[in-house]
Amino acid sequence: MSQAIQEQFATNVYYDRTFDIDAAKILPGEYYFTSKDMMIVTVLGSCVSACIRDRVSGVGGMNHFMLPEVGSDTDSPVSASMRYGTYAMEILINDLLKAGARRENLEAKVFGGGNVLRGFIAINVGERNAQFVRDYLRAENIRIVAEDLNDIHPRKVYFFPRTGKVLVKKLKQMNNNTLVNREHDYANRLQSGKVGGDVELFS
């Protein structure tokens, strides 16, 4: 039996000399939130990240996820896939609310969903991820105040939850295949795993 896929709280926290600030780097399947004056960084290909913050208190966080391609042996591939995306969003939102964020103050900036994984031609996984994150936030009444979705380039995202500032750098030239390999491995892990746990939305 394969292990359940769980969202992992990022542990790669370091001091960023360029921005002169503590930072957390998140990888596919990870998320991070903080009430401190920090930066959260990730590199996105076809995955998406939602940067969500309480615009009053400055408590905020970021996730990094992909909807799995679900095989035809499940009852409903779409709903099984959406369940994973919902779980990835809810775990971040719940932690923000538990940390003192108020639901009515939440706002989001969303990034990623690039068409960078050449192997996923049958259904553009990037577009599917981008559409999911928009639909989810609309359903939850969390306002999207900025977005940079789709396109063909990977992007590096720097999020400063305290102020809400986001810097996005399009990576027109990749020096190696690390990002694509990382997302392929993540996609394969999602394919063979089950979504870990049910999350009830904390209110």
Image (cartoon, grey):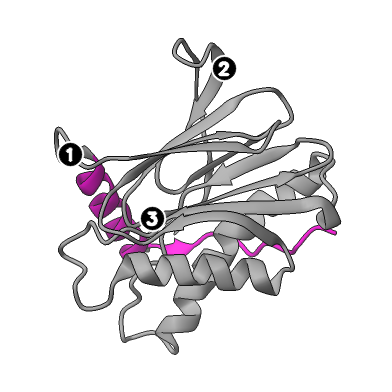
Bin the neighbour count of mark 2 within 10 Å (Cα to Cα): few under 14, some 14-19, many 20 and up: some
Q: Which mark is residue 38?
A: none
Bin the neighbour count of mark 1 within 10 Å (Cα to Cα): few under 14, some 14-19, many 20 and up: few
Q: Position of residue 15 (x, y in %)?
A: 50, 13
Would you name the residue on which mark 3 appears? Answer: 47
SS for tag 1? Answer: loop
- 143 and 6: which is toward the camera: 143
Would you name the residue on which mark 2 appears? Answer: 22
Would you name the residue on which mark 1 appears? Answer: 173
Question: What is the span of residues highlighted in magenta in the rendered image?
Answer: 179-203
Alpha-carbon distance for marks 3 and 2?
A: 24 Å
- First in residue order: circle 3 vs circle 1: 3
The residue lying at 58 percent from left, 62 percent from top is 87
- State whether residue 82 is above or below residue 38: below
Q: Is residue 187 visible?
A: yes
- First in residue order: circle 3 vs circle 2: 2
Check whether the beta carbons of the residues at disc 3 and disc 1 lie within 8 A of each other. Answer: no
Magenta stretch: includes residue 180: yes
Q: Is residue 47 left or right of residue 104?
A: left
Q: Is residue 159 left or right of residue 54?
A: left
Question: Which quadrant, please, contains the C terminus?
Answer: bottom right
